Amino acid sequence: MEQRRLGANGPRVSAMGLGCMGMSGMYGPADRAESIATIHAALDAGVTLLDTGDFYGSGHNEMLIAEALKGRTREEVVISVKFGALRDPAGGWGGNDTRPAAIRNFLAYTLQRLGTDHVDIYRPARLDPGVPIEDTVGAIADLVKAGYVRHVGLSEMGAETIRRAHKVHPICDLQIEYSLLSRGIEDGILATCRELGIGVTAYGVLARGLISGHWQAGRAGAGDFRAASPRFQGGNEAANLALVEALRQVAQGRGITVAQAAIAWVTAQGSDIVPLVGARRRDRLAEALGAFETRLGPADRAAIETAVPRDAAAGARYNAVQMANLDSERAAP
């Protein structure tokens, strides 16, 4: 598989990463054996970047990855971990904690669950309004010096925060939602990353399955956080699925699937962008990998953007409470 470097000084990784969140209940029940088989298939196909969060399944996801990596060499993978989100026993969310002491505590548990002595990329999941980003990044930088972390990343941060963080320690990449339905990064954040030599790992490239070409209206059930997502609600869902059908026509004309068109479009936005695909099954993984067997020319990209125009998505990325926690969604001063 093609390799891309994350930022000016970050690691080289596969041109596609595997997002493992959905293997730990965020999208409803998952099959443990199939999840592990999917990770194995990804590694065998040349995927080297595995993305997780210590709060995915309250540690379940990290332990799942550790199980999948048994018998593999540590150097085969680049493991990216988000931290800071607080959970409660009922599975609820309790804000973010990125104080230096909390970061050291979170990492200690992560290393134990993953069964490793270091994390390749460590990043706060969200900006903690009670902790200056300089303190958060400074604490991770200390862990880099101690050998427990290789690189510092960010997630869902705005341009000003990115600049402040980068002054403390080089940032290798920003993880942020980027897809045909979510193009806010183009309003200045992407330009800031490129100016500073920071890569982008794009999650949600299939809008959590909404633009995969496989989603059916009303499918989100109990335990699936999409059931409360604005884009999957009533009229919004119907409007978004109409966009998918327009995209399907373009994809079929190119001889690819809807998912492959959506992934290829993100990949074509720059060699500094690595899409994260949240495949939970081997067949979905195989389909996603097929996106890298085609190259979209200017006419192809224009046709895709005509089918799914910028700002055409119905509904916000998250509910109002979660949107308020996204530094990346705040207007620049």
Image (cartoon, helix red, strand yellow):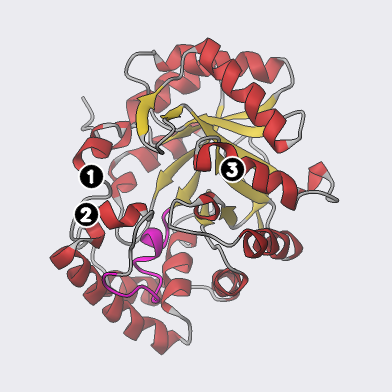
Q: Looking at this view, is 300 or 229 the one in front?
A: 229
Vertical relation: 156 (above or below) 301: above
Q: Identity of the amino acid at label 1?
A: Asn
How far apart are labels 3 and 2 at the CA level?
27 Å
Q: Earlier in the sequence, mark 1 or mark 3?
A: 3
Q: Earlier in the sequence, mark 3 or mark 2?
A: 3
Q: Identity of the amino acid at label 2?
A: Pro
For label 3, the SS is helix
Q: Residues within 10 Å of mark 2 (few under 14, many from 20)?
A: some
Query: Which stretch did the figure color magenta?
Result: 204-218
Q: Identity of the amino acid at label 3?
A: His
Question: Label 1: which residue?
Answer: 319
Q: Quadrant of residue 161?
A: top left
Labels 1 and 3 touching (C-beta < 8 A) = no
Task: Give the residue at x 46% y 39%.
Answer: 194
The answer to whether residue 296 is magenta is no
Dominant SS of magenta comes to loop
For label 2, the SS is helix
Labels 1 and 2 touching (C-beta < 8 A) = yes
Q: Quadrant of residue 18?
A: bottom right
- In the image, 331: left or right of 276? left
Q: Which of the image's four quarters has the N terminus?
A: bottom right
Task: Give the residue at x 34% y 45%.
Answer: 185
Residue 119 seen anywhere in this rendered image of the structure = no
Q: Residues within 10 Å of mark 1 (few under 14, many from 20)?
A: few
Q: Earlier in the sequence, mark 1 or mark 2?
A: 2
Question: Label 3: which residue?
Answer: 60
Question: Label 2: which residue?
Answer: 230
Q: Residues within 10 Å of mark 3 (few under 14, many from 20)?
A: some
Q: Looking at this view, is 191 or 30 the one in front?
A: 30
